[in-house]
Image (cartoon, rainbow, N blue to C red):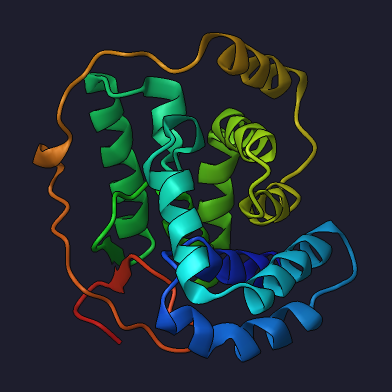
Amino acid sequence: MSDRAVHLAASVLLAYPDERLARALPLLKATVAELEPGEPAGRLAAFLDHVAATPLSELAEHYVATFDLKRRCCPYLTYYTYGDTRRRGMALLRFKQAYQAAGFEVTGELPDHLGVVCELSGRGATHMALRLLREHRAGLETLLRALREERSPYADVVAAVLATLPPPTERERRAALRLAEEGPPAEEVGLQPYGLEPQGLEPQGLEPQGLEPQGGPR
């Protein structure tokens, strides 16, 4: 349950900060306060302190400047492995199929957005979400490194998610190092044809982004 709670909180914090975040802040603080002591709880608590002390307009401005305007801080996990290449389309399809196998449809976001993967765990498919995160650990490590270099408070959220994974294997460490040195591939293609239709979502509780149970919203 601890990993699930960490991921659920992270899914909300990795969404665009608007009034929903302000409304969810008390529940987020209560959720994090109930986590077992450790790195995930400490990292999330630090970020929540930042949120509480920062005007919403500044949070939104930093979010856009970080995740929308800096490719090195891309929140889409398959980008780090495949860049904007045709192979990335197949990787996105695999994410989409994983959500469908867990009983969800992706709405309003690409399925490899870190916040959406975390939401999958928060909705109960933690094992599936952890598998996806583990498979893209090199990208997560690269994102964390970039956020730290940018001195972004969002580094705490990504570090909290990474701390829920097992220690990296030697192969995973080599992959992260290679990705840091070489960067993602650079073939430019569009991603529109992969069947993701933007829709609104008003889930219950903490209002995470991007997933809708099959058969209609809850």
Position in image of residue 155 (x %, y %) = 67, 48
The structure residue drawn at horizontal position 70% and vertical position 83%, both measured from the top left corner, is 29
Position in image of residue 207 (x %, y %) = 43, 80
Does the rendering let one see residue 192? yes
Q: On the image, which quarter does residue 33 sit in?
A: bottom right
Residue 105 to residue 177: above or below: below
Residue 62 is left or right of residue 37, and the answer is left
Residue nearer the viewer, 106 or 23: 23
Quarter containing the N terminus: bottom right
- The residue furthest right is 37
Residue 84 to residue 77: above or below: above
Position in image of residue 127 (x %, y %) = 57, 56
Residue nearer the viewer, 126 or 146: 146
Does the rendering let one see residue 125? no
Position in image of residue 57 (x %, y %) = 45, 70
Quarter containing the C terminus: bottom left
Residue 125 to residue 72: above or below: below
The structure residue drawn at horizontal position 62% and vertical position 40%, both measured from the top left corner, is 147
- The residue furthest left is 193
Q: On the image, which quarter does residue 197 sit in?
A: bottom left
Residue 17 is left or right of residue 153, and the answer is left
Residue 36 is left or right of residue 59, and the answer is right
The structure residue drawn at horizontal position 31% and vertical position 83%, both measured from the top left corner, is 202
The structure residue drawn at horizontal position 55% and vertical position 31%, both measured from the top left corner, is 139
**How many numbered marks, from 0 up?**
0
